[in-house]
Image: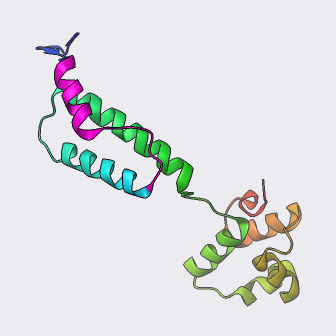
């Protein structure tokens, strides 16, 4: 198979690619150890200044396998109304007690922070106004 890239034609060598596959043995990742092993292969490929078409194909495959594993096992950017409130308080150097004038009682704030109760739409809007953000950040979807 060949691929034209403007100035030159790159040839994809299936035998070379098969050798690379044999060396790295990529498969669906099921453990941290397998993930780490394939991450090391990716890092090695990324450290090279020029990759062959076969190395590029292997890199693309490994990245996809790693992304699939990490999407299943790592919940990145998972936030809750509680974590958003705490983050905004910390970022603005405020205390939980600073929310009493906004929500009306320290008991309610304690229950919201502990996750016992959620905020109503109106309360979320008041918090949004207080923090100068969209109130929907504080509503469980």
Residue 88 in percent (x, y) is at: 62, 74
Is 65 positioned to the left or the right of 114 in the image?
Answer: left
Quarter of the picture containing the N terminus is: top left
Q: Which residues are magenta?
A: 14-31
Residue 3 in percent (x, y) is at: 22, 12
Q: What residue lies at 84% left-to-right and 78% top-to-bottom?
A: 103
Residue 53 in sight in this render? no
- Displayed quadrant of residue 58: top left
Residue 56 in percent (x, y) is at: 24, 31
Q: What residue lies at 86% left-to-right and 61% top-to-bottom?
A: 121
Instruction: From this view, report whether residue 33 is shown above or below residue 10.
Output: below
**What kind of colouring is applied to the model shown?**
rainbow
Is 15 positioned to the left or the right of 131 in the image?
Answer: left
Is 37 positioned to the left or the right of 20 in the image?
Answer: right
Q: How many marks do you count on the picture?
A: 0
Q: What residue lies at 58% left-to-right and 81% top-to-bottom?
A: 90
Residue 76 in percent (x, y) is at: 54, 58
Residue 58 in sight in this render? yes
Q: Nearer the viewer, residue 19 or 79?
A: 19
Instruction: From this view, report whether residue 49 is shown above or below residue 110.
Output: above
- Displayed quadrant of residue 26: top left
Q: Main secondary structure of the magenta part?
A: helix
Q: Nearer the viewer, residue 54 or 93?
A: 54
Q: What residue lies at 85% left-to-right and 75% top-to-bottom?
A: 116
Q: Nearer the viewer, residue 133 or 64?
A: 64
125 magenta-colored: no
- Displayed quadrant of residue 51: top left
Is 73 positioned to the left or the right of 109 in the image?
Answer: left
26 magenta-colored: yes
């Amino acid at each position: 198979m060949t691929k034209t890239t403007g100035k030159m034609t790159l040839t994809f060598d299936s035998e070379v690619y098969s050798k690379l596959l044999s060396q790295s043995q990529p498969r669906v990742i099921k453990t941290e150890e397998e993930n780490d092993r394939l991450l090391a292969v990716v890092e090695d490929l990324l450290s090279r200044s020029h990759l062959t078409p076969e190395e590029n194909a292997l890199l693309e495959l490994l990245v996809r396998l790693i992304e699939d594993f990490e999407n299943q096992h790592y919940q990145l950017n998972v936030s809750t109304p509680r974590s958003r409130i705490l983050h905004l308080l910390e970022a603005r150097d405020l205390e939980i007690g600073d929310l009493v004038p906004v929500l009306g009682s320290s008991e309610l704030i304690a229950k919201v922070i502990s996750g016992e109760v959620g905020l109503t739409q109106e309360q979320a809007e008041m918090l949004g106004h207080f923090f100068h953000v969209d109130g929907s950040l504080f509503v469980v979807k």
